[in-house]
Image: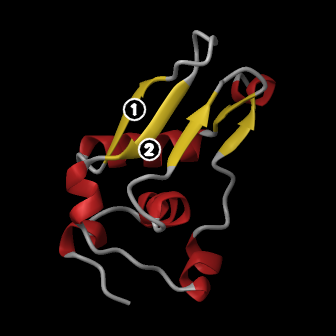
């Protein structure tokens, strides 16, 4: 599996989130309304890492919920080569990206 060095410098969690949500390309988005479910602590850390690396962006979603956010690949992120095998994803991607909002406060 070919992965650019920038991808391999990320934590396994960030690589798993990137591959699990955006391996199909730039037009894929992830919108969280943050009403019943929000990012888990682990998911939030991985997303922040990807945003900090300039690979994804986060913007206010236009869906009527003030807490909503849409994540998408940046042009930079879309130009990177990243692929993960199912075996790698099973080993490293087996965590929940989101959790119930009530659980986030615990």
Q: CA distance from mark 2 to mark 1?
A: 9 Å
Question: In the rendering, at what x and y percent does residue 8 appear?
Answer: 29, 73
Question: In the rendering, at what x and y percent does residue 48 appear?
Answer: 38, 40
Quarter of the image where one finds residue 37: top right
Task: Evaluate if marks 2 and 1 touch, with contact meaning CB atoms under 8 Å apart.
Answer: yes
Question: In the rendering, at what x and y percent does residue 58 appear?
Answer: 39, 32
Question: In the rendering, at what x and y percent does residue 42 appear?
Answer: 56, 47
The residue that disc 1 covers is: 58
> Does residue 55 appear left or right of residue 64 in this picture?
left
> Does residue 36 appear left or right of residue 13 in this picture?
right
The residue that disc 2 covers is: 47
Provide the secondary structure element on which disc 2 rests.
Answer: helix
Which residue is farthest front? 27
Quarter of the image where one finds residue 65: top right
Q: Residues within 10 Å of mark 2 (few under 14, many from 20)?
A: many
Location of residue 40 with respect to 4 vertically, above or below: above
Provide the secondary structure element on which disc 1 rests.
Answer: strand
Image quarter (top left, top right, bottom left or bottom right) of the C terminus: top right
Name the residue located 43 percent from the left edge and 57 percent from the top edge: 14
């Amino acid at each position: 599996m070919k992965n650019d060095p920038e991808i391999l410098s990320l934590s396994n969690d960030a690589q798993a989130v990137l591959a699990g949500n955006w391996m199909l390309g730039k037009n894929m988005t992830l919108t969280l309304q943050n009403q019943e479910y929000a990012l888990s602590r682990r998911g939030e850390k991985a997303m922040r890492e990807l945003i900090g690396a300039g690979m994804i962006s986060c913007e206010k979603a236009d869906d009527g919920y003030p807490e909503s956010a849409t994540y998408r690949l940046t042009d930079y992120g879309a130009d990177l080569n990243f692929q993960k095998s199912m075996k790698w994803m099973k080993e490293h991607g087996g965590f929940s990206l989101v959790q119930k909002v009530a659980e986030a406060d615990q």
